[in-house]
Amino acid sequence: MRQRVMAAKMPEHAARSALRESELLSQINPSAGEYSIGLSYIEYLISLPWNSSTEDNLDLVGTEKILNQRHYGLDIVKERVLEHLAVRTLILNRKPRVLVVDDEEIARKNLEHVLLKEDFNVVTASGGAEALRCMEAMTFDVVLTDLRMDKIDGIDVLETICAKWPGTKVIMITGHASIDCAIDAMKRGAFHFITKPFKLDDVRETVGQALMKRGSTLSPKGQVICFAGPPGTGKTSMGRAIAEALGRKFARISLGGIKDEAEIRGHRRTYAGAMPGRIIEEIRRAGSINPVIMLDEVDKIGEDFKGDSSSALLEVLDSEQNRTFIDHYLDIPFDLSGVMFIANANVTDNIRGPLLDRMEVIEFSGYTEDEKLNIGLHYLVPREIVDQGLSGNPPTFEQDGMARIIRDYTREAGIRGLQRRIAAVCRKIAVETVKASNSQVSVVVNTGLIEKYLGPRQYYSESADTVDRIGVSVGLVRTDAGGDIIFIEVAGMKGDKELILTGSLGNIMKESAQTALSYIRSNAAMFGVREDFFDGRDIHIHVPAGAIPKDGPSAGATIAIALISMLTGRPVRRDVAVSGELTLSGVLLPVGGIKEKLLAARRAGVKTVILPYRNRVDVEGLPEDVKNGLDIVLSERIDEVAERALIRTSV
């Protein structure tokens, strides 16, 4: 066992722990329970890939090609991967920079000649003052400095570099060496001490060791990215594509519903059934210390008396801490800095703030109809033809047939429903192909065959409303499945000044409704409404859509428009949708999910969308195909929205 531990070439601290455990085993009876626990522990330590890693594929063109083959669109995600590769390429291909400091010209030239042969960038300085000026001008990986020089000697250079540039390694060279002098230099922070006359091989070896030590601090930190977006938008498959493009191993950990902290940190090694956490176990299975690990459904982590799993992830996803991650089973530090973590979530609102702060969030928005059309024809159809056994006589999907599937048979932000519909069509064709085994006629899937294969249409892409109505406004909301439209209905009746709110509303929407009513009551004259309109009557605000819970800070303006319409008798334009939160002073506050809301407006046939002016940056950053066909109006105050959304009636 000791021989196996030594042959595993583990880090010093891990080998020391394994050897200590093996010494304990030599003193324990093999029939004892502790013996099997210790034996399993040593075996696990040996099986971990302490020094095994995969080389990143640094070919930017090839990586971009792979990502484009796997996914259509998602340009922001692909750009982030290419940025990661570019950074690694620059760091790994950078020539080490060495500064040689000596007041003897011959010594400087000899060292410069030797180091240039090693393909280093070499700069020389004739004294301590010049050396410090060079350090101010540029960064160096290693400094070789003479000990005794005029004015500013080597010790002064060493202390200044250690104080201002602690990452730079300093090697002392002197012909007046003594043990006390060497000890003093090492205490002050010198990496090594070389005496004159020196051997060139010793200089090469020492500089190489210093560069290796320096390189460990310069290596790119593990990336922590969070893909956030509706289901079916390609978050998990993009993680696999990234691993393939980088040439790394891929591992996936599903976090949905886990409540036990030990799933992340492992169990204490105190009983026979103890196991390491999922992070260490997936690295062992991958056989690499730098895999891509996908943390699936990070927004659905549970919590109970066994611990808080999301808090256990804080150390894992912190690039400043995970170099020394300690799993409870291993009980020794394990370096996770080379791992690329990719988390995914439907909404980031459910992720705890400290955990979200450790991740770079990349939004996956819903697909436009044009994007779905391209994905369906060029990605999903070829895949389903193979999966359903039709590759011998493949059907042809026409563009209008695919468009009808998208419009009439799916209503989603992602493409999972579209994939299921395409698979259903392919299965129907497979049945026909098997029945007509003698006939080899290729099927052309057009609009006429869609209803035959999928039945009557399930969704209708109609307008938000068919007529202009009083007291009914259209709002835009973002849900877990993308964007959608909602109707706000307001009715007034005799009563006792009661505000009735129905429609399974959350606290935020209830407060929005109360704010909208208070604003209108305090500004009744502006809208031509009697100031005592609330006396002797009740106002009922209802948000349909069954018992679906509805909450979020974006319905205040929509509620206010419906209220003003009911009180003034002015109908709301049927093709206008509003999104924005309202203050008591009538100012519109910005909202999120702009892309999803605009896509929902297009699907519902809305022509004009009114958004807060502070969302101007979000609107300008959207691609043109999202905004096509929509008149997007940016407003700062609710009275401007009312003039645009309400029809002025003649007296």
Image: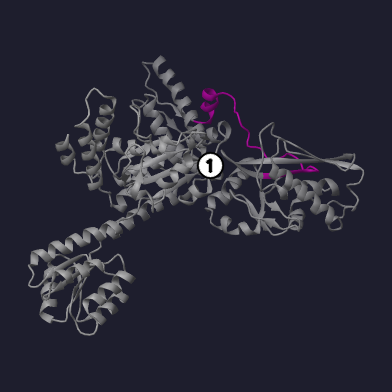
Residue at point 35%, 37% (across, down): 251
Q: Is 632 or 116 nearer to us in this picture?
A: 116
Q: Is residue 275 left or right of residue 153?
A: right
The magenta segment is 446-475
Expressed as whole percent of the image width and height from the top left, the position of residue 401 reads 51, 33
Expressed as whole percent of the image width and height from the top left, the position of residue 68 reads 38, 46
Which quadrant: the N terminus? top left
Query: Quadrant of residue 201 in the image?
Result: bottom left
Q: Is residue 374 magenta?
A: no
Q: Is 128 or 575 nearer to us in this picture?
A: 128
Work out whether residue 129 can be spotted.
Answer: yes
- Magenta stretch: helix, strand or loop mostly: loop
Which amino acid type corresponds to the residue marked 1 in the rendered image? Glu
Q: Using the image, determine if residue 282 lies above or below residue 33.
A: below
Query: Circle 1 is placed at which residue position?
Result: 369
Q: Using the image, determine if residue 129 lies above or below residue 283.
A: below
Q: Is residue 115 left or right of residue 165?
A: left
Q: Is residue 644 left or right of residue 522?
A: left
Expressed as whole percent of the image width and height from the top left, the position of residue 334 reads 31, 45
